[in-house]
Amino acid sequence: MPHPAATADPLIAAVNAGVEIYDLARTLRIGMPQSPNHPPYWHALPRRHGDMVRSDGGSAANDMISMGTHVGTHIDALAHVSQDGRLADGTDAREASVGGRFDRLGAHTIEPMVRPGVLLDVATALGSPQGLDGGYEITPANLEFTAEVQGTPIEAGDVVLIRSGWGRHFDDHATYVGTETGVPGVSEDGAVWLADHRPHAVGADTIAFERLKPGAGHGLLPAHRVLLVERGIYIIETMVLDDLAAAGVHRFTFVLSPLKLYGATGSPVRPLAVVSRG
């Protein structure tokens, strides 16, 4: 006989009815592609099995990792970017970092997310399901067209994910980073279009969310300014979106919980898209 809570709680009832969970995070591994602006991921075993054996024959291994907080699938805190010396709340950016941490807008202030999610599969909507070209600029017209074709209007508070198809290059470090080839992504005007729909957060399958021009590197990031500084909207980068797109899933429940890294400018995350099988 089912536990009474299983029938009384609609969330538990939905889980019991069956859900599909899509993992939207990249596996953290040594040598994975990353922005040259951030420290790389490193993993080591300071103790291996057999280094110390207990009297009963048992043995344990342990690990240590080092990494930048903007490596792999991660979320940008509002402290990550400033403009003209000011952060999103208007505070002086240099003064806010005194002490080596951001007390007000650090990663520890990002609340866990359980929100409506929308996938804008721009690549498929524009007739390039395998992926857009390097340096392609995703415009407001592209975003609006994709939302209309999919029948997925954006509501305030949604988490909006942009699929460019560039994720297929993840195992090709140079191409994914896009210093020479450029990377497709949302333009400055596209960021304004998204912000005007008042999402809680946005994300993409690329290394910097926004468009990177061929040969330009990561020097100018105007969409970050619009979203983080001017509108207070979180950015999630280096996501896995191909499985979600292949299944034709454009609406889902989005789940994400950052690490509570006090004062940090970002956090590694493992976002999930939860879809009812019904």
Image (cartoon, rainbow, N blue to C red):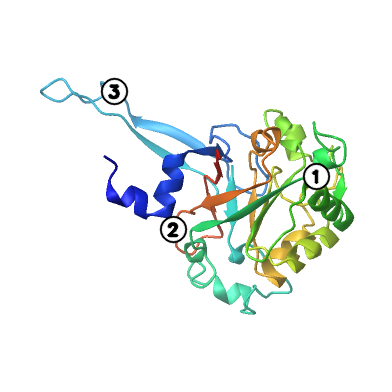
Task: Tell me what residue is drawn at x 52 percent, y 65 percent.
Answer: 106
Q: CA distance from mark 2 to mark 1?
A: 32 Å
Mark positioned earlier in the residue sequence (3 or 1): 3
Q: CA distance from mark 3 to mark 2?
A: 31 Å
Location of residue 73 (image quadrant): top right
Q: Which residue is mark 2?
A: 260
Give the residue type at disc 3: His
Q: Picture coordinates of residue 150 (x, y %)?
A: 78, 47
Q: Which residue is mark 1?
A: 122
Q: Nearer the viewer, residue 8 or 252?
A: 8
Q: Nearer the viewer, residue 185 or 72?
A: 185
Front tag of 3 and 1? 1
Front tag of 3 and 2? 2
Mark positioned earlier in the residue sequence (3 or 2): 3
Q: Which mark is residue 49?
A: 3
Give the residue type at disc 1: Val
Q: In the rendered view, would you say 91 is above or below 263?
A: below
Q: Nearer the viewer, residue 79 or 233?
A: 233
Task: Tell me what residue is drawn at x 65 percent, y 79 percent.
Answer: 90
Q: Picture coordinates of residue 74 (x, y %)?
A: 58, 49
